[in-house]
Amino acid sequence: MSGIKVLRKLQLGGETTAGTAVAADFIWRGIATGLEDTRTKVRPDENVGITSMTTRQYTPMIDAELNMASTEATFEQLPHIFEASLDAATPAQDGAGTGYIYSYPFPTTARAITDIKTYTIEAGDNQQAEEMAYAFVSDFTLSGNAGEAWKVDASWKGREASTTTFTGALSVPAVEEILFSKTKLYVDAVSGTIGTTEVTCTLLSATLNITSGIQARHTASGELYFCVAEDIGLRGTLDLTFLHNATAVAQKALWRADTPALVRLEAEGSALGTPGTTYTYKTLQINAAGVWNTFSDSDGDDNGTNIATATLDLGYDTTAALLGSILMVNELTALP
């Protein structure tokens, strides 16, 4: 029987030891794509007395990847992207409430691979499943537009793709989408406190682009796949689209003056079963320090209202002592 598109699925499991494959423990709720076997193939040049090439070929290096298609971000599953790219968080209960806080600071010092969580990923359909161990997120994008849900897409890297069978008996998890229209925007000076000054009725869209800095390192270590993943430094940008109002004018002045800023985006979901000390609702909070690297208000409109677009280039600010972070509040005592 041929593989059927609607029977594709992605299943993931957090590894205890990076590179030691584990059974999957949850199904990813989103569009499922297959693993890409990106091993290197070489056909060497040779002169053997014939005009054509021969069938000689070899494989000097093995890699694999998964390009996770853009899908609705949820309070329950989005943390897996952060675990595999930023930090392996230890959830903290919010007082006596049912909310648990997952905190993901943007790193400013080199991380060991044990600082993040690596995953074993199973992907395929009813015809064939494949598996990739030592999987981490090399980059991800979190984007939102007014009237829609936040969306996430991510690029995963792993050691190799090999055939397997899906881990069975996994149920589809309950999730809640993060709605962009429930997002609040705050912009503050680096001498102030992030999340103090709310900017209302202005934000049309936002896109956070993160390159994790985690990269595979191939060495001569007795195997064709990479030996270890190393951190060479996180990079990121935050693209915002505003209505062309006083807020946009103020940010343009900051851009012209090369003045850094603190930006917070905070989206709330449904009420927690029991409110905590700090949080009453499921929450996604993005904090970023940086400088406005680009700004444009010369063209473009939204239903007849002029707009402005700006890019905050993330950077550590010594006054605020901040690069950035992502915080998630849900009701999971631990990620599956």
Image: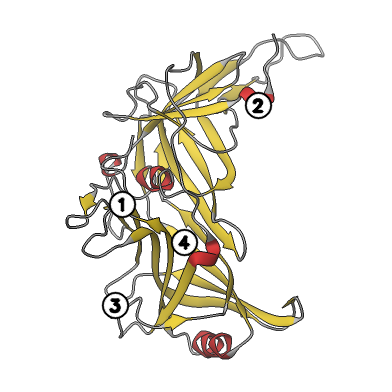
SS at circle 2: helix
Q: Amino acid at mark 2?
A: Val
Pair 1/4: label in front: 1
Q: Which residue matches tag 2?
A: 6
In front of the other: 266 or 120: 266
User: Which element type, helix, strand or loop, lies under badge 1?
Assistant: loop
Name the residue type under label 3: Ala
Disc 1: which residue: 273
Residue at image mark 3: 320
Q: Residue 334, image x and y in percent?
A: 27, 40
- Give the Cα distance between marks 2 and 3: 48 Å
Give the image location of residue 30, x and y in percent: 56, 38
74 over 268 or under it: above or below:
above
Is the residue 69 above or below the residue 255 in the image?
above
Q: CA distance from mark 3 to mark 4?
A: 18 Å
Q: Quadrant of the C terminus?
A: top left
Upstream in sequence: badge 1 or badge 4: 4
Of 4 and 333, the residue lying toward us: 333
Badge 4 element: strand
Residue that numbered label 4 is attached to: 236
What is the quadrant of the N terminus in the image? top right
Identify the secondary structure beneath mark 3: loop
